[in-house]
Image (spheres, grey):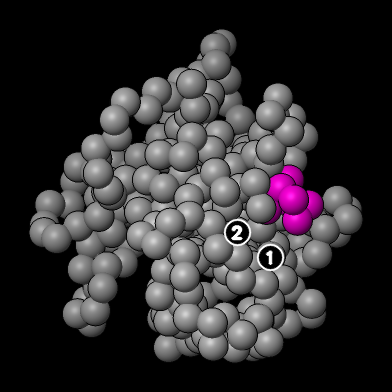
Amino acid sequence: MLNTVIQLYPLPAAERPLTNLYLHHNLRRLNQSSGLPFVYANFVVSLDGRIAIPHPAGHSLTVPKAIANDRDWRLFQELTAQADIIISSGRYLRDYADGRAQEILQTDDPRFADLRTWREEQGLAPLPDLAIISGSLNFPIPDILTAAGRRVVIFTTANPDPQRVRELETHAGQVIVAGDDITVDGAQMVQSLHDLGYRTIYSAAGPRVLHLLLQSGVLNRLYLTYANRLLGGFPFAAIVEGQTFPTAVGMTLHSLYHDPQALDGLGQLFAAYNHA
């Protein structure tokens, strides 16, 4: 299988190597006029808008196997490798503890050993830190996720249970209240992460967190892989879940690549959008 894609935008069209395609976007070198960290997110989506469908075992939703693929996964890993900290959720920690989730950046996988080397050359720890968004604080923190001095920063809503806060800060790290008693505020969260010294923030969470980031105006770039398959079915998750935005969020195309080799020759598109 050819390890190349076709750059469709910006023009002129050109053939590019798949490996390091997103690493060459140099997210860590992008400067924000606001001085705040660079915040980005990524999803793989079917042509009918599905990023998750019911899990075969009957619990929660999962990425459809029909659109998940190694070529997209390589670029997911390249995006993760550029992060100082990864946004996730209490659900991820519950799934990890139950054996239903895996480490997000898989630098122990021989396929991605080059990304581990890349992080070392940048003076970064082998794994990014974790930012967990949770209103309930109802989750475990597996020891493996805090190994080797890895920091976990937990963002929660107003008036959290003080005993649970003490438990988490004793075992895992810092708990920060950011927002009201209903939801975490994305702007407060990003400002707090800036104050803690983070420069690149990658959201590996789901559609509700993307809504939070968009509503607060803190998302800088959205990466989407459009897999050339239609899935149907109900229920399902799309890339954004939440109330209608008071004003539609404008995005401008940053880059677009055609990957004709993926999905047994059906192909897929790798698109990246900047917040307008």
Between 207 and 265, the residue placed more toward the observer is 207
Q: Position of residue 181 (x, y in %)?
A: 39, 62
Location of residue 204 with respect to 38 vertically, above or below:
below
The reply, left or right, for residue 238 in relation to residue 43 is left
Q: CA distance from mark 1 to mark 2?
A: 6 Å
The reply, left or right, for residue 262 in relation to residue 23 is left
Q: Position of residue 154 (x, y in %)?
A: 58, 68
Between 186 and 4, the residue placed more toward the observer is 186
Residue 194 among those drawn in magenta: yes
Count of marks, rendered view: 2
In this figure, which residue is indicated by the disc labeled 2? Answer: 86
Q: Secondary structure at mark 1?
A: strand
Q: Which mark is residue 175?
A: none
Identify the amino acid type marked 1: Asp
> Is there any visible trace of residue 89 in the rendered image?
no
The reply, left or right, for residue 275 in relation to residue 166 is left
Q: Earlier in the sequence, mark 1 or mark 2?
A: 2
Residue 59 among those drawn in magenta: no
Q: Position of residue 165 (x, y in %)?
A: 57, 80
Instruction: Determine the image quadrant of residue 34.
Output: top right
Q: Which mark is residue 129?
A: 1
Q: Are marks 1 and 2 in contact (CB under 8 Å)?
A: yes
> Is there any visible trace of residue 97 in the rendered image?
yes
Give neighbour class at mark 2: few <14, some 14-19, many 20+ (Cα, 10 Å). Answer: many
Instruction: Determine the image quadrant of residue 187.
Output: top right
Instruction: Determine the image quadrant of residue 92.
Output: bottom left
Q: Residue at x 50, y 48 (%)?
A: 186
Segment tinted magenta in the rendering: 193-200
